[in-house]
Image (cartoon, rainbow, N blue to C red):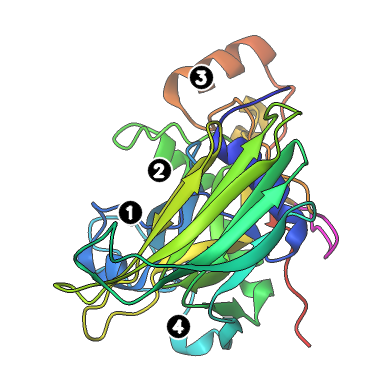
Amino acid sequence: MVTDRAPDIYVPLMLPKGHGYPLWLPDPLSNLPPAYLSRGTQIGDLGYLADDGGFVYLFNVCKDADDPVNLNRVPPGFVPLTSNSNLGVLERLEMHDKNSTITTSAVEQKSIEFDVSAEAPTALGAGCGFEFTSSSEQGAVLVLPDGGERYDCASLDMFEEYAIANAHSWYKYLNGQGQGRQIRNGMLYLVTGCDKCYSWGNACYSHLTQSRCASLKFLTTGVAELSGTLRYRWEVQSGVHKRSHHRDMTPGAIANQTVFLRGYSISVRESSALRLLLGVKTVKVSKSDMTNCKQLRAESRVPYATEQRNVVLATTGMSTSGTTQVIPLAPFYKVV
């Protein structure tokens, strides 16, 4: 099916690059707690993958209920998994070099320079950037002007077990009365690793006119005099989706933009009436390998949504089974 939605183009094209689940919208939502906004995604974040290509943070399973990032966000009776100091986090602070690019195979690139003084009077210095060209019908590009960092948890088993133990209660709390978030089955996501950066530019396109070669320019337009901030912009032809984010030059600012996620996608199947009465719950864990680069597909069903659950029980009787499925979203990167 032909699509013109940026996330539907960008995600499947970037998945095979092997860094994890790509986010079309790397920036955190602006209405999240300040403590979260300053750091961005962290290991232990529970959230869901939104239709717009972003990650919606809910709470962190490794932090206490009264932690600033969890305050008034966790479900009743919440017990954290463990403290961050016990996670055994693997850090690679220079995983992606400055001015590195990640592109689909059919995209060619070259470095360019230009004079920005005429078009941007408040800018200092010469401009530079990249020009990307491709004759392919589809393409995707990610530029990391300041490079990127990688964080991964070495103890995945405890996250898997914790997700299995809590999956049903999470969906009940988030989709039930009071919250009513309508999170579709398979969209709930527990983060065990991520790639983060200070600044970025991403772009994608699909099914441009075959006679036209796709041309994209990612430009650094100098340093603004007032803010001391490097500015970025795209020059693209019609039909190309593009976004960018410049670095926060506030002293002490850290990388809070998340370009790739690694973790567990969580699916559940609600128990039948008989199984509920007997207190029986079947748990199933499915694990993907390093080469699994399939895009996450969410069901249309919303687990534990009040109206939907009543309909399911009324029409299917006792034929459904209580199943939890926790799937690591491919690909996890291999530690060498």
Residue occupying the point 84% across, 62% down: 289
Q: Mark 1 and mark 2 in contact (Cβ < 8 Å)?
A: yes
Residue type at mark 4 is Asn
Q: CA distance from mark 3 to mark 2?
A: 15 Å
Magenta highlight: main SS:
loop
Residue occupying the point 65% across, 49% down: 140
Can you tell which of label 4 and label 2 is closer to the viewer? 4
What residue does disc 2 label?
173
Magenta residues span: 285-292
Q: Mark 2 and mark 4 in contact (Cβ < 8 Å)?
A: no
Q: CA distance from mark 2 to mark 1?
A: 8 Å
Q: Mark 1 and mark 3 in contact (Cβ < 8 Å)?
A: no
What residue does disc 1 label?
76
Q: Secondary structure at mark 1?
A: loop
At label 1, counting other C-alpha atoms closer than 10 Å, the crowd grade (few under 14, some 14-19, many 20 or more) is: few
Can you tell which of label 1 and label 4 is closer to the viewer? 4
Quick one: label 4 or label 3, which is nearer the N terminus?
Answer: 4
- Establish if 174 lies above or below 21: above
- Which disc number belongs to residue 308? 3
Q: Position of residue 250 (x, y in %)?
A: 21, 79
Q: Secondary structure at mark 2?
A: helix
Q: Between 177 and 73, which is closer to the camera in this rendering?
A: 73
Q: CA distance from mark 3 to mark 1?
A: 23 Å
Q: Position of residue 184 (x, y in %)?
A: 54, 34
At label 3, counting other C-alpha atoms closer than 10 Å, the crowd grade (few under 14, some 14-19, many 20 or more) is: few
Quick one: label 4 or label 2, which is nearer the N terminus?
Answer: 4
What residue does disc 4 label?
84
Q: Position of residue 43 (x, y in %)?
A: 50, 72
Q: CA distance from mark 1 to mark 4?
A: 21 Å
- Answer with the quarter of the image where residue 176 lies: top left
- Establish if 205 lies above or below 300: below
Quick one: label 1 or label 4, which is nearer the N terminus?
Answer: 1
